[in-house]
Image: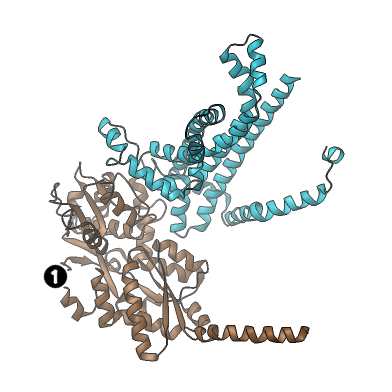
Chain colours: A brown, B cyan
Amino acid sequence: MYTKFSFKKWVVAVVLSTPLLTLAADISLLNVSYDPTRELYVEYNAAFAKHWKAKTGDTVTVKQSHGGSGKQARGVIDGLSADVVTLALSYDIDEIGAKAKLIPKDWQKRLPHNSSPYTSTIVLLVRKGNPKGIKDWNDLTKPGISVITPNPKTSGGARWNYLAAYAYALKHNNNDDAKARDFVKKIYKNVPVLDSGARGSTTTFVERGIGDVLISWENEAFLAQKELGPDKFEIVVPTLSILAEPPVTVIDKVVDKRKTRAVAQAYLEYLYSEEGQEIAAKNYYRPTLESVAKRYEKQFPSISLIKIDDVFGGWQKAQKTHFADGATFDQIYQK
Amino acid sequence: MSKKTNVLPGFNLSLGYTLLYLSLIVLIPLSAAFLKTTEFSFSEFWQVVTAPRVVASYKLTFGASLIGAFINAIFGLLTAWVLVRYDFFGKKLIDALVDLPFALPTAVAGIALTAVYAKNGWIGSFLEPNGIHVAFTPVGVVIALTFIGLPFVVRTVQPVLEDLESETEEAAASLGANRWQTFYKIIFPALLPALMTGFALAFARAIGEYGSVIFIAGNMPMVSEITPLIIITKLEQYDYTGATAVAVVMLVISFLLLLAINGLQWWSNRRNAEAIE
């Protein structure tokens, strides 16, 4: 009696688990990304799944996780099994290598364009009609102008903002560091609220009606304009800005353990394809592929863009001189 | 004491469980924080936790929490009084409303408060033209911390007030006490321990609060940065040790303050007992 029942149970268990076994043959990937890429990757994941199915017959499901870039990197350091990360700045990915040893040191050399399939930059968003007549970075230092930007200590986007303004000041003051520091200090004196993230600042500017100008990611500015209508806000393109390269990489230790290296690698490489680039451009990221860039020429005005490696000696150095405790940003607020 | 009077068996077993439970849930995670800071030498630790920006944040966090808890002690007592002593239409609804700050996700509270107090919000649009700035100033921090702390005082005072027998008040009145004397000599002393517990809970809750404050504070260094934000800031820079160092300081100050409040409560209880004898 007992053995019979248990045999039956076994049969049931095996029958029930068969569909599970076939499901397990499907592949799933986890892409850990930052806040503003949500819409981009929803579209891209569907496109990639189709491409992969046609190429190999396998079904791939990509799960997405979004949040502040630094917080996401800490999640991966603390054990979140991301197959790939697509973050806001290379500093955050560097730390995944340094703190958790999940990727090699030279990860950024593994894919073209510093492992950044798409780029963006920093622009200024003003209210309709530009009532304060803001044209360029130096207008932000004028008294009576209220500037909205997040806190560079907590927001990756805010660090790009700070560096863009700093680079402008360097260029106009013969690379005089003291004058550039003074320049950004004047801007931050005009900042009434330092939100902890880029989306928070957009909300403060758009919903709360605070500030005359929002320093913003170009893609966020386009998105705000699209969501809220071009009759409310205008994008002002400064004469000089910074080339923001949000990089991507596979997490070696994770893909080797989960045996997903081939598909994870293909997932990132497909971002550089015609279709991947098209989706990035549609979501307001600047494409790196020449042919797609040409097609979207009108959408993205040409700005003279400096590179962080050229002007600030890379992220590690920029972080240390400008955003570490007691560095130039902290000095703005010291009496 | 427990040995000779306890009618139910199992003191050893229940104490054992209590200690195990407290260790697992409270002590082990906290000691991990303390251990992490040992990566610092003492002078490094001291330098991190006494940096001007950090000190300014302690002042704001503890100051605003204290003010918030005080406001709640006064108005929470009033609310509890009204809910216990009077009957009116919609009383059950108000009673349920009191718990709302408990249930609401703190971020929702923060966003709602900011929307109301910003210069284009319902209240802010009246205050700002008169030069009163609430959102994005330390005043906003106090308001958020008052909001989240309210239920603690009401819910601790309410049952005590319910148990208070009206005979004692009648006796006081018949012995010639006026209304004010009845309140501050008879009712208030009986409520004081519960009120202090409510105050301590509201205060402790406010110190650790992050979600609701972060939206309304403005987060300006030296002015409106709360200590939990400093901790997040340090984590954002991958400075785990620095973050835990600040956390440990918060922990120690909170613990000492709560200990002091408990001591005060014990003292007032004893004084009460003596007065009754």
Near mark 1 (Cα within 10 A), the count class, few <14, some 14-19 or many ≥20, is few
The quadrant of the image that shows the N terminus of chain A is bottom right
Total marks placed: 1
Residue A168, position as x, y percentages in the image:
21, 58
Residue farthest to the front, as pictured:
B89
Figure quadrant of residue A317: bottom left
Q: Can residue A111 be seen in this view?
A: no
Q: Residue at x 46, y 73 (%)?
A: A82
Q: Which residue is drawn at 25% across and 33% down?
A: B129
The three-letter code of the residue at mark 1 reads Lys
Where A5 falls versus A297 (above or below)?
Answer: below
Where B141 falls versus A24 (above or below)?
Answer: above
Q: Can residue B143 be seen in this view?
A: yes
Answer left or right for B112 relative to A27: left
Answer left or right for A39 relative to A230: right
Answer left or right for B72 relative to A135: right
Regarding mark 1 in the picture, which secondary structure is present there? loop
Q: Mark 1 points at which residue?
A: A298
